[in-house]
Amino acid sequence: MGKKNRGLLAGVALAVVASAFAASAAAADRDYADAMSREHAADTANASPASLTAPAAPVAGSAVVYGSVGGRDLSGWLAMPRGAGSIRGALIVIHEWWGLNDNIRSMAERLAGEGYAALAVDLYGGVSAVAPQEARDLMQEAMANRPAAEANLREAHEYLREELGAAQVGSIGWCFGGAWSLSIALMYPDTLDAAVIYYGRLVTDQAALAPLEVPLLGIFGAQDRGIPLQSVRAFEASLAALGKDAEIVVYDDADHAFANPSGQRYNAIAAADAWRRTQAFLARYLEPATPRTR
């Protein structure tokens, strides 16, 4: 067989492999969307009194453009400690499958109340959902264009590092955003300073996790069928085998989205303990802002 024919065959083989990989990834995304649809079938994004928890200290929140992808501005919600001087620790805050809504803005402000600059990103291009089918459609659209979502998060990371001058940057996300919190840790395996994952889709392959040097806090519910306990334990085992800095917490009586105060599965006791653990974890790796000097 001539060199030219061997080259053609090799190219065809690579194309077949790439096509099979893409098909497998698309099938996994569909399965994930199906699982989230089942978990959220009876949910709405209606706010409840619990979603109005005030920050621990005064904060200022406002809409901000934090970058651009494909010629389109990226708009998010930036919450800052009021009266802050130098920003030290900052967080990329990643929304659930509902999108960047009032609940996520409120969570960004609670994080700012702990002393951090909290940038709530928008992976849905300015749209949020109020019903499960809308949320599914938006999530699938975002997953189908993963490079754009990754570029979005890179813009957020650069904004916090370069524009705000944050010395440390971490990530936190819930549900769809929990999966992306792990993803950005894998995108910045030795430069992201901390990552918090609330019941997000997991990576259990040790080869994929091996480069990871980011401290992790994973928070899950044992009753969650969308992110089943088996996958959580496999994730935990892979991290332990690799000697990674990770804390995995499972609440026996909690379901998917148990920490969402605007959801129908809100578990106040588990959510309060998870928030306490989140505060303690972030305090170990991110410094609060320094007061402005007069």
Image (cartoon, rainbow, N blue to C red):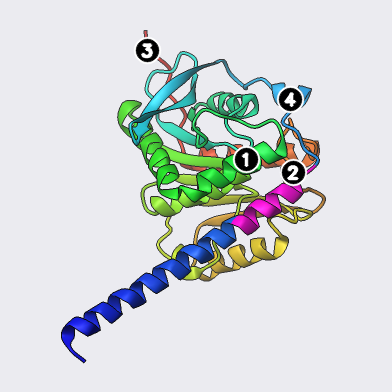
Tell which tag, 4 or 3, sits nearer the viewer.
Answer: 4
Say which amino acid is labelled 4: Ala
Q: Mark 1 — residue?
A: 97
Q: Give how far apart the Cα atoms at labels 2 and 1 are.
A: 10 Å
Q: Is residue 38 magenta?
A: yes
Q: Residues within 10 Å of mark 1 (few under 14, many from 20)?
A: many
Which one is in front, 191 or 56? Answer: 191
Q: Residues within 10 Å of mark 2 (few under 14, many from 20)?
A: many
Q: Position of residue 209 (x, y in %)?
A: 47, 63
Tell which tag, 3 or 2, sits nearer the viewer.
Answer: 2
Q: Are marks 2 and 1 in contact (CB under 8 Å)?
A: yes
Sequence-wise, the earlier of marks 4 and 2 is 2
Sequence-wise, the earlier of marks 4 and 3 is 4
Which one is in front, 38 or 119? Answer: 38
Q: Which mark is residue 40?
A: 2
Q: Which mark is residue 293?
A: 3
For image coordinates 48% across by 35% down, the residue present is: 91
Q: Main secondary structure of the magenta part?
A: helix
Q: Are marks 4 and 3 in contact (CB under 8 Å)?
A: no
Which one is in front, 95 or 289? Answer: 95
For image coordinates 58% across by 43% down, the residue present is: 139
